[in-house]
Amino acid sequence: MAQSGCSNLPIILRQAPSDLNPPHFRGAIISKRGHLRQIHTTATAPRKVRDIDAVELNARIGSEPMSHQIDYSPLDQPHILGFVFYPRPDWTPPPPSATDHSVPVADGISISCRFYPTGESAPNLLFFHGNGEVVYDYDGIAPLYNREGINLFVADYRGYGQSGGAPSFSHTVADAHVILNYFHDTMRASACSGPLFVMGRSLGSLPAVELAANHAQVLRGLIVESGFASTGRLISYLMPTFQSVHLEEFEKANLEKIHSITMPVLLIHGERDEIIPHEQAEIFYQNVGSKDKRLLTIPGAGHNDIMLIGMREYFSAIREFVFS
């Protein structure tokens, strides 16, 4: 079959990018998704775009109005954001057959994304990465997904890669809906007719869960790698001195959102995750509303070496999930 926008990629094995290394962890954690390549940076001038309207967005992709919303503004404080988000304005040209995309999310602000296609009928996976990564870190990992017959579309956050603006919890969640709309339209325009899935790694589970809770008509399933069931708990893991009157409120709201998810769910977590404990995956599994839910625990794996230690099990579970 002739390809239209979904072409093959070569297999190039490199180590994966690192994630969630706040200052008190750096030096103590050996990054297995390590920074092995020279970093190149470029500056791009922001372009003016109109604000994205949520009602229009849902109408365009055929979703129901968003009903599972959480106010993250109490967490959007400089001392918290500076400890959770680690934006890197890094970029390198895309490898052959991959393409870069710029998704307008607000006036003058766009989110950088990279698409790694493999075939027109392949499942399409929208991927939100960890807090210390950028899309080009996945140039060496995307071929592994392609080898399994999966089209991979990786999205940055504000301030990451070539994206404009500054990251926050509220923006990360709100922008995810716009990115999903773009992802949906791009797959169809590229003749990539396979089903749509969303996946979040670590911090990326925040926008991934947001989309799964609000766009069941568009997405076929949710995959969470090394994720968390509560945003408040995530911050408390990273900031042991963190205290907030909103902690219980976030705990309840997050669990309610997880319970509202009824699409198939795959959770992958390292047994010895030193940053987000495995118990978060267990809490997620126990509370998610889906009847088709799976929890894969990688024995002996931590937060950043989960793919390397359990690569066979990791991709076997993902392949079975998206093709079932």
Image (cartoon, rainbow, N blue to C red):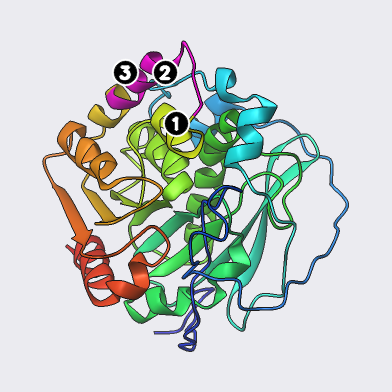
Q: Which mark is drawn over residue 236?
A: 1
Q: Which mark is drawn over residue 298?
A: none
**Residue indicated by mark 2:** 247
135, 101: nearer the viewer = 135
Report the residue at 19% width, 67% height from top.
320
The quarter of the picture where the C terminus appears is bottom left
Report the residue at 41% width, 38% height from top.
211
**Residue indicated by mark 3:** 252
- Give the distance between the C-alpha atoms of the residues marked 2 and 3, in whole angstroms: 9 Å
The x and y percentages for residue 253 are 35, 19
304, 156: nearer the viewer = 304
Report the residue at 52% width, 44% height from top.
181
Q: Amino acid at mark 3?
A: Lys
The x and y percentages for residue 42 are 83, 64
**Residue 119 visible here:** no
Q: Magenta span covers which residues?
A: 241-255
